[in-house]
Each structure stands twice: as C-alpha cells, then as structure tokens.
Image: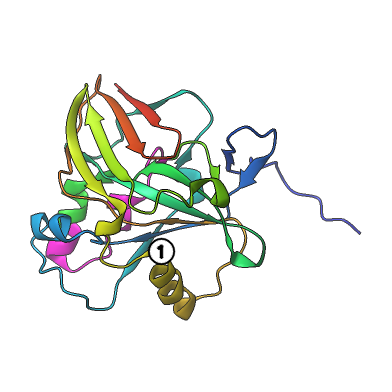
C-alpha cells in the first residue's frame, strides 16, 4: 500500500541548461577554506591538512529564475557572499553536472558561534543561503578545468580566481566526503570560494560567473 503523506512538500530542484528535465536535490555539502588566499583572509594557514565540511539544507536552495531575488535574512547585520563551483552527483554518484553557486553566510552569527565553540550551522543554513544557477552537463564543462571564477557586486569585481587554485581538487573532495558517508544521486557539493568575500546589503545586485557555465544573477531585497 502506498504511503499517504500528511501534507505535500515541494522537491528542491535545479534547472538544467537546454533541457526540460530538472535535477532533484537530496543533500548539500560544502568544503571550507579550499582556496589559499581565502583561507588567509579568514585567519587560517592554508596547508594541506585534511579538509573539513559543513552542510546546508536543500530548502536553502534558490533556483529557477533569471534573477534570483533573495530577501536579506533575519538575525544578521553582516551577510557575506562566497561564489563557488557546485558539483551535482547523478546515478552511481558520478558527476552529472556543474553550476555556479553562492554560499551566503551570516558572518556575525558564524563568528559568534566560533568564539563560543558552538556549531555554526545557523550562520550557513537559512532561507536563500544557497542560490544556484542552471546545471551544465559534465561532458560540456570538461574543457574548462582552469576556468575563471568571479563575483561582481553592483558591477564591481569583488572575487576573482581560477578553478585550478583549489587546495583540494574535485576528485579529492569526493574521495574525502565518501569516507564520511555514502554519496548518492541528488547530492550537491560546493567546492570552496576564492578570496574577496564581503558584505552585501538590500538593493545590491550580484553576478556570479564561472567560465563555461551559465552566470548566476542575484538581487538582495529588503
């Protein structure tokens, strides 16, 4: 007998470039401080110690419109942008595609949690914390392994780097994550951000870009 649910829940999904299909999202993993200059700006020595990860809720995902409108979140006065390459896992947990994403962070909540030795999930996971652009298939993106990754705020460049500047490459990230848990179809991995993270305010317009992928446009609303 089929289960009957108490109420319906919407499945978080990503648009796929030039396709009528959508990518269902199961979990969101993020690697921390995976670009050396960003690690330094966060006060960390970027040696190749074992990477560490945090998660976001699939409900944090924002996808579907040409311009993603994201309300300035509650409980913060210091919302930071972090542009990232997002890896999407398909059948047999193989890479199905790539997209541009922004890891929005309530930096003041994160800093307070770190200071008190508490988990900092509230700084990373909240409504609108994970806007992601359209997914490009893995085969279509393979020719851009050293592509530029950048983010503009109101037309001015804030972050800029190249994908080959990652401390841990994509294969290594997947290997380390797999040692913690079984990766499954629908999992997303945010692969880290270059230096230049900073605050945004209501009214700001952001453009996140990675060579070979559809750009991501976000407007912060009041």
Is residue 74 shown above or below 172?
above
Q: Quadrant of the C terminus?
A: top left
Colour scheme in use: rainbow
Res 110 quadrant in image: bottom left
- Does dot 1 land on a helix, a strand or a loop? helix
- Of residues 44 and 202, the one nearer the viewer is 44
Residue drawn where x is 50% and y is 49% of the image: 58
- In the rendered view, does 44 fall on the left or right side of 6? left
**Residue 109 x/y as whole percent:** 21, 50
Placement of the N terminus among the 4 image quadrants: bottom right
Query: Looking at the image, can residue 164 be seen?
Result: yes
- Image check: 213 left or right of 193? right
Asked whether 194 or 125 is in front, the reply is: 194
Residue bearing mark 1: 170
Residue in the image at 8% along x and 61% along y: 43
Q: Position of residue 94 (x, y in %)?
A: 59, 64
- As drawn, is 105 to the left or to the right of 177? left
Asked whether residue 104 is in view, the answer is no
Would residue 121 be counted in the magenta stretch? yes
Query: Which residue does the image show at 29% across and 43% down from the upper left?
Result: 148
Query: Image height check: is 201 above or below 92?
Result: above
Which residue of the protein is positioned furthest toward the front in this rendering?
143
Closest to the observer, 107 or 197? 197
Q: Which residues are magenta?
A: 113-131
Residue 44 shown in magenta? no
- x 32%, y 51%: residue: 124
Query: Residue 61 location, x and y as percent?
Result: 47, 42
10 Å neighbourhood of mark 1: few (<14), some, or many (≥20)?
some
At which x and y percent is residue 166?
27, 60
């Amino acid at each position: 007998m089929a289960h009957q649910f108490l109420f319906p829940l919407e499945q978080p999904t990503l648009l796929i470039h030039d396709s009528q299909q959508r990518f269902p999202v199961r979990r969101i993993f993020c690697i921390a401080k995976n670009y050396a200059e960003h690690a330094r700006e966060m006060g960390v020595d970027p040696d190749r110690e074992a990477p560490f990860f945090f998660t976001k809720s699939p409900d944090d995902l924002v996808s579907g419109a040409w311009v993603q409108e994201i309300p300035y979140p509650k409980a913060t006065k210091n919302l930071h942008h972090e542009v990232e390459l997002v890896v999407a896992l398909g059948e047999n947990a193989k890479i199905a595609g790539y997209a541009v994403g922004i890891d929005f962070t309530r930096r003041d909540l994160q800093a307070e949690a770190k200071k008190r030795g508490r988990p900092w999930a509230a700084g990373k996971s909240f409504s609108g914390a994970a806007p992601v652009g359209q997914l490009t298939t893995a085969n279509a993106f393979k020719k851009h392994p050293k592509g530029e990754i950048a983010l503009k705020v109101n037309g001015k460049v804030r972050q800029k780097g190249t994908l080959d500047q990652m401390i841990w490459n994509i294969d290594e990230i997947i290997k380390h994550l797999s040692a913690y848990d079984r990766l499954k179809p629908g999992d997303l991995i945010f692969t880290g951000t270059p230096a230049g993270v900073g605050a945004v305010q209501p009214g700001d317009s952001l453009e996140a870009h990675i060579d070979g992928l559809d750009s991501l446009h976000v407007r912060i609303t009041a």
